[in-house]
Amino acid sequence: MTKSKTPARVFFTADTHFGHIGVMEMSKRDFASIEEHDEVLIANWNAVVGPNDTVWHLGDFAMKSSPERCQAIFARLRGRKCLVRGNHDRDRVLGLPWAEPPADLKVLKIPFEGGFQPGGHQEVVLTHYALRSWPAIHHNTLSLFGHTHASMPGTCRSCDVGVDAWNLRPVTLAEIVPWLRASPVEPEEWGIKRRQEAERARAAEQAA
């Protein structure tokens, strides 16, 4: 009997800061040592990510780690790993065997039912820094980011996918979308567009 394959999934994460002692105090990660911190993050990653899954890491993979330490951690993490470059990602991180060349911004169409777009796909814009505006914002694309360590509120179409916002582990759209639906905060550009449309409507009435 052939064992059925688990369908590949797409995960998102950011700001793991492997090897960075300072992040434990900065982000209130309660560990006795950086070694314990790194081991828990590796275990959490591997508990949810399968070998056929893809993980998009949105920057700051490691900090103050040797190239050898970065390579050792990278090799232990499951899945096909891709990087959107963060402000702390130096050659020791950029030189890791990522599945795709590291980018500063990535736009992806993810197979996903139950998102904000028709057709069984959800388009996402991936960056390290949070964006106020992003491509196709009026067509329900999502902006996913890191960097803020859960300190910056998202909107109903954008959120921090860093480990500090998601129990120190990668997350999927199946987890992100319900969070977005529950947010009462609209992207700033939506309000701007409504005001512009109202002004045009008033001008058209006055000209009639």
Image: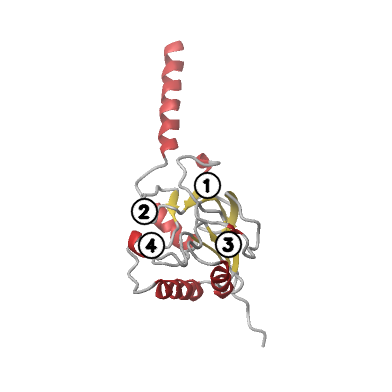
Between the residue at mark 3 and the residue at mark 1, the CA separation in whole angstroms equals 32 Å
Between the residue at mark 1 and the residue at mark 4, the CA separation in whole angstroms equals 34 Å
Residue bearing mark 3: 92
Q: Which mark is nearer the camera, 2 or 3?
A: 3
What mark, if any, has residue 141 been given in the picture?
1
Between the residue at mark 4 and the residue at mark 2, the CA separation in whole angstroms equals 33 Å
N-terminal of the two: label 2 or label 3?
3
N-terminal of the two: label 1 or label 2?
1
N-terminal of the two: label 4 or label 2?
4
At label 2, counting other C-alpha atoms closer than 10 Å, the crowd grade (few under 14, some 14-19, many 20 or more) is few
Residue bearing mark 2: 182
SS state under label 4: helix
SS state under label 2: helix
Residue bearing mark 4: 22
Q: Is residue 38 left or right of residue 77?
A: left
The quarter of the picture where the N terminus appears is: bottom right
Name of the residue lying farthest toward the top: 207
Q: Amino acid at mark 2?
A: Ala
44, 60: nearer the viewer: 60
Identify which residue is drawn at 49% across, 71% down.
45
Identify which residue is drawn at 52% across, 42% down.
134
